Image: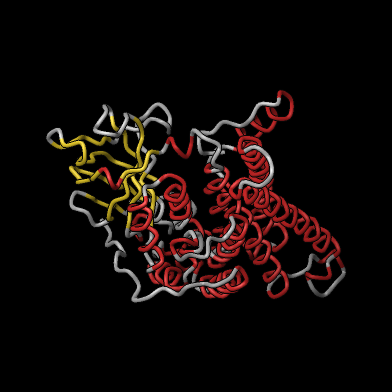
Amino acid sequence: MTAVSQVRPDSASRIGSTAEALSVARELAAAFATGAAERDRDRRLPHAEIDRLSESGLLALTVPARFGGLDVAPSVLAEVVSILAAADPSIAQIPHSHFVYLNLVRLSAGEALAERIFTDVLAGGRVANAQSERGGKTIADISTRLTPVDGDAGRFVLDGEKFYCTGSLFAHTLAVLAKLEAPAGDLAPGEYVAFIPADSAGVEIVDDWDAVGQRTTGSGTVRFSGVEVTANDLVARASATSAPTAYGAYAQLLHVAIDVGIARGALTEAVEFVRTKARPWFEAGVDRAVDDPLVVQRFGELEVDVATAEAMLAAAGRRVDEAVAGSAGSPRELVAEASIAVARAKAVADRVATPVASALFEVSGTRSAAAGTRLDRYWRDARTHTLHDPVRWKYQHIGRWLLRGEDPPLHGVI
């Protein structure tokens, strides 16, 4: 078990505009890029960097205005995430579930819970997920249970084990997906998300994440044994995922932003390497690698690929903005169009991120493959993160929508 960074910052800044948010993101990205390769090499968790992210106010960007937040549009948040991902993809992914579950609170939580969570986030608090499980037939099978205490419909105990709990090692609050088997007071049976303090009695957070990429996301195992929960801590998940709320499109947009950021970061690193370290191939008859016409051609192609992915991300972001804002059109149509736009963007980002991270070596030459360069981290990060939510199913939903007019499902992952 690894110590959890549960001490909140002394203070958190309040960001006052979209322009300021993007400026702060760029400033932090420049700082986080320094040392990113070493953190990856040593698997050194970015506790100080995540504290700085909290202090900056970026983690409170989506707090609704009525609770004192800036309430930025999804497209703005996606741009912030992409900027951070270009510098350190792990740092960009750590708050993914933070923003997703803040969206769930916005959509479905009672007033008291919403005020508690949003006030905490404005003060620098962080939320992480405890959702996926091993052992089920699919990832949709949940064995973690909420059990009423001695027939008291307002009190429960939480038992189960989760993995892929990204950000849990940095979290102050855990958002735990669990099942209630039988009615309890006003609560119907079904899936609920319990918002509990990460340091609650009976919670064990284990640092056992060992993937080839995204090595410092803190995506380990979390165990729950008799954790006390009240009805006021619970949010019914179905209220966000069985209605046209854009909950899934919102979450997927941020995944696209991470992939696109990785692609941009890899290309930026390749440009720097070729400018400063690479040698031209002797047959080119030039003195510098940047003057080799075949290298120039390849960089032009890669820039077009990355810029295309960025444009698709921006277009999808606008669609999600419209769905969340409830622009002209029915909610179902707006959400369907947003989900399809995000699915298209995810498919393009998947086609771009891993190949660009691989092409980094192609254009940089043999010396770029030396272990000391750590340039392989972009490919490992892209390969690992693009596995999130298979793109083959994105194509299915796009094709069904195009050919048969079928709206994509409302299960929360498209």
Residue 75, above or below 409: below
Residue 289, above or below 145: below
**Is 397 on the left-hand or right-hand side of 162?**
right
The quadrant the C terminus occupies is top right
Of residues 18 and 292, the one drawn nearer to the viewer in this rendering:
18
**Is 150 on the left-hand or right-hand side of 9?**
left
> Percent from the top left, x then y, of residue 170?
36, 61
Residue 309, above or below 241: below
Q: Which residue appears at 35% of the width and 73% of the height?
A: 9
**Is 257 on the left-hand or right-hand side of 200?**
right
> Percent from the top left, x then y, of residue 398?
68, 33
> Percent from the top left, x then y, of residue 57?
47, 70
Q: In which quarter of the image is residue 171?
A: bottom left
Q: Which residue lies furthest to the left in this view?
A: 150
Q: Which residue appears at 32% of the width and 30% of the height?
A: 188
Q: Residue furthest top?
A: 404
Q: Which residue appears at 74% of the width and 57% of the height?
A: 307
Q: Can residue 209 be seen in this view?
A: no
